[in-house]
Structures are given as structure tokens and as C-alpha cells.
């Protein structure tokens, strides 16, 4: 598999570099590019909408609450239709830049900020989490994995990363508890992955959501289940990052 799959087959005769609308009316039906899984995915199989806590200890990750709504569709000829029953995983680092259940991070056994849901009949899920922190060499991001099956019943796996606007991240990283870690050393503009095709994976600027403090944002994407290159299992691509992990 290529290190980063940033291109898609041409749909409806409209060529685009990684983004193709499924029909003029379906403005939310956009095929997004894949990005690498990275070394921090753990298949915990935690089916839950609120991923802030460790399910064993009840300890909640510190940080500002974020509601992330995701809607997934599938390309069906010249249109897109909702994709129900897809397994949608997200995971990201905490306010200090650490991932849970990773030996090298000293977090073995912890499972906060990880979770999955099955998409509803409208292809939608909503996660409650906290705004991510940052770590050396990477801009702020959230990992995303979607697993489903093709019309032929074969496994299909889409893996990517979602990004927040630099202006928004700079503002909240200056507040507690994020400010104890200092300002991020990498922004979207200087991140090796974001500069490839991350603008197509940029979340809308989160808006305030009750109860305060808290924010909400949504994101829609479509899957071309006929694309065998995307369907293959994903993992970290060696060589793109010499030392910093994604």
C-alpha cells in the first residue's frame, strides 16, 4: 500500500485530487483520502459513544469536551447512500500528548480516548471526547478507522486522520490543562501528513456546545467500496517519518 492514499478514482467523470462529489445535490457526499494508521492503534473493541474514561478505573481524561459527529455514506453508481452498520473507531492523544495502552508511553492497560460505534441507519455516529493535545513532530489530529464489507461480502477498511484549524488549536492549547505542555511545535502548515492532502480532512471549526465549556463539530465522508487499494488493511507506512510517530 502507498504510504498515504491521497488520490481517488474519478467518479461521475469529475477528476479531483482525492475528493470527488457524488452528485451536485449531495454536497456532503465526498470521498476523502486515506492517511496512515500509525503505531498507536489498539483494537480495544470498546463500543461506546463517550470515550473520555478508562472503562476499568472510571478515570476521565482531562481536557475540554468535544462532540464529534461523523456521517458515512457509500458510493452507489452516480449517487451516495447512507452506510449503516459500519464499525467506526477513533483514537487520539490526551492533553499531554500521550496515547493510552501503549507501552512506550507508559500507559499500558489504560483505555481512555479510544472507542468505536456502529453507524446508525443514517450512517451517523456521535462521539464525546476531549480536544486532543499534541506531541513532537505532529500537528493536532484525531485518528479514524472505518470497517465494513463490500457488496461482495469482502472486508473493507478505510483509515485516515482528521485535523482541526490551526487558529482554533492555538487558542485552546493556550488554556488549561493544555498549556502545561506548551504551544505545539508543528502546525497544519508544517505537518508532513497534513501538507499531502490534510486540507481534505480538515474539520469545520468547532462551535461552543452546552454544557460549557465544550465544543461540537461534524464531518461527512463517502467510501468507494469498489476501490481495492483502499479496502486493504492499513498500518503505519515506514520511511515517511524518520523518528516522530504519527
Image (cartoon, helix red, strand yellow):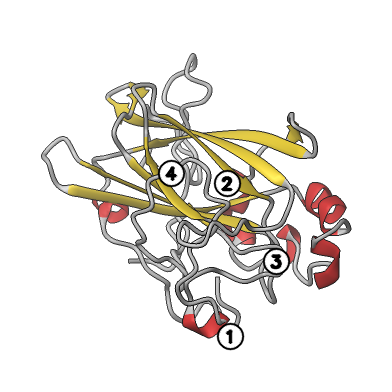
Asked whether, in this view, residue 211 is left or right of residue 110, the answer is: right
Can the viewer see residue 155 in this picture? yes
Mark 2: few, some, or many residues within 10 Å (few <14, many ≥20)?
Answer: many
Residue 188: percent from left, percent from top: 71, 58
As displayed, is residue 13 above or below residue 129? above
Q: Are marks 4 and 1 in contact (CB under 8 Å)?
A: no
Asked whether, in this view, residue 156 is left or right of residue 13, the answer is: left
| Residue bearing the label numbered 4 | 48
- Alpha carbons under labels 1 and 2: distance apart: 24 Å
- Alpha carbons under labels 3 and 4: distance apart: 24 Å
As displayed, is residue 63 above or below residue 244? above
- Alpha carbons under labels 3 and 2: distance apart: 17 Å
Q: Are marks 3 and 4 in contact (CB under 8 Å)?
A: no
**Foreground disc of the pair 2, 4:** 4
Which quadrant does the C terminus fall into? bottom right
Residue 138: percent from left, percent from top: 66, 69
| Residue bearing the label numbered 2 | 201
Please, what secondary structure does the residue beneath circle 4 have?
A: loop
What label sits on residue 134 in the rendered view?
3
Q: Which residue is drawn at 59% across and 33% down?
A: 218
Q: Residue at x 45, y 37 (%)?
A: 15
| Residue bearing the label numbered 1 | 243
Amino acid at each position: 500500500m502507498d504510504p498515504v492514499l491521497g488520490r481517488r478514482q474519478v467518479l461521475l467523470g469529475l477528476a479531483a485530487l482525492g475528493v470527488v462529489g457524488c452528485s451536485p445535490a449531495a454536497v456532503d457526499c465526498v470521498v476523502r483520502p486515506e492517511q496512515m494508521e500509525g503505531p498507536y492503534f489498539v483494537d480495544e473493541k470498546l463500543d461506546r459513544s463517550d470515550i473520555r474514561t478508562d472503562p476499568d478505573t472510571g478515570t476521565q481524561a482531562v481536557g475540554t469536551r468535544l462532540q464529534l459527529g461523523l456521517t458515512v455514506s457509500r458510493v452507489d453508481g452516480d449517487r451516495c447512500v447512507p452506510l449503516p452498520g459500519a464499525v467506526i473507531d477513533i483514537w487520539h492523544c490526551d492533553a499531554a500528548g500521550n496515547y493510552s495502552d501503549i507501552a512506550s508511553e507508559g500507559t499500558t492497560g489504560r483505555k481512555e480516548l479510544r472507542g468505536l460505534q456502529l453507524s446508525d441507519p443514517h450512517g451517523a455516529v456521535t462521539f464525546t471526547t476531549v480536544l486532543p493535545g499534541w506531541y513532537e513532530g505532529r500537528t493536532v489530529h484525531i485518528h479514524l478507522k472505518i470497517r465494513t464489507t463490500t457488496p461482495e461480502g469482502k472486508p473493507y477498511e478505510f483509515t485516515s486522520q482528521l485535523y482541526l484549524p490551526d487558529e482554533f488549536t492555538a487558542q485552546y492549547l493556550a488554556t488549561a490543562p493544555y498549556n502545561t505542555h506548551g504551544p505545539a511545535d508543528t502546525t497544519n502548515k508544517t505537518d508532513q501528513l497534513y501538507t499531502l492532502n490534510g486540507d481534505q480532512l480538515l474539520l469545520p471549526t468547532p462551535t461552543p456546545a452546552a454544557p460549557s465549556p465544550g465544543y461540537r463539530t461534524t464531518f461527512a465522508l463517502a467510501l468507494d467500496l469498489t476501490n481495492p487499494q483502499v479496502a486493504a488493511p492499513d498500518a503505519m507506512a515506514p520511511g515517511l517519518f524518520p523518528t516522530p510517530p504519527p
